Image: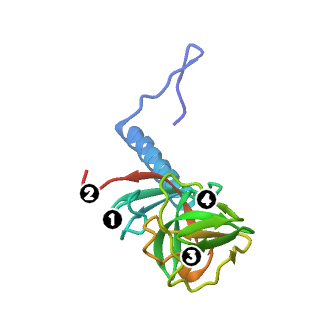
Amino acid sequence: MPAAVSGGKKVKRKKTSRDYAIELLIKIAATVVLVLILCFFVIGIHINHGNSSYPMIKDGDLVITFRLSDIKAGDEIVYTRDGKIKLGRVVAAGGDEVDINDSYVMVNGLGIAEDVVYPTSSDGAKIAFPYKVPEKSFFVLNDFRSDTDDSRAFGAVSDKECEGKIFLILRRRGI
């Protein structure tokens, strides 16, 4: 419907409730699309099942990852192994050499820097040490080091298996 012209001025048509409803639906749809893009390509949301990252991340905690982050040694990551979501700390990246002896982890001949020194054993490891980490991969250890279901059991984690670096932890139990 064209706007009426009166005395050379255009007269605007008043918005109806239908117009406001359509604007609101367009804004909601745009927000939903943006959130979906954000959740599928930029962030990941996971619930931790188990104590592999205890004491930092406890069983039942909600962790949010940033998929576009550059991952380096010391970062806590979420990765997929055999269809399961796992959490672990990156100890070494592609090209590094990892050795575990006398309950101590060494990367490229130097001890790793940790806030708390966790005794780490190579007992039960299915790989031989020293271990050369393949390119575009990470050597991941659980913070709860007596749980050996990490790179000691299956080798390096490929960057394709990596879901992202953890940047937010929401405690859901035992607050």
Per the model, the C-alpha gap separating discs 2 and 1 is 8 Å
Type of the residue with mark 1: Asp
Instruction: For the residues labelled 1 and 4, say whether their Cβ atoms are less than 8 Å apart.
Output: no
Task: Using the image as rendered, state which of residue 175 and residue 44 is in the foreground.
Answer: 175
Q: Which residue is mark 3?
A: 151
Instruction: For the residues labelled 1 and 3, say whether their Cβ atoms are less than 8 Å apart.
Output: no
Q: Which residue is mark 1?
A: 59
Type of the residue with mark 3: Ser
Does residue 19 sit above or below 58 in this rendering? above
Q: Identify the mark nearer the N-term, 1 or 4.
A: 1
Per the model, the C-alpha gap separating discs 3 and 2 is 28 Å
Q: Please tell me whether mark 3 sits on a helix, a strand or a loop.
A: helix
Instruction: For the residues labelled 2 and 1, say whether their Cβ atoms are less than 8 Å apart.
Output: yes
Residue 84: image x %, image y %? 46, 77
Mark 4, other Cα within 10 Å: few <14 / some 14–19 / many ≥20: some
Residue 159: image x %, image y %? 65, 69
Q: Is residue 160 visible?
A: no
Q: Residue at x 75, y 69 (%)?
A: 95
Q: Identify the mark nearer the N-term, 3 or 4.
A: 4
Mark 1, other Cα within 10 Å: few <14 / some 14–19 / many ≥20: some
Q: Nearer the viewer, mark 1 or mark 4?
A: 4
Task: Using the image as rendered, state which of residue 145 and residue 95 is in the foreground.
Answer: 145
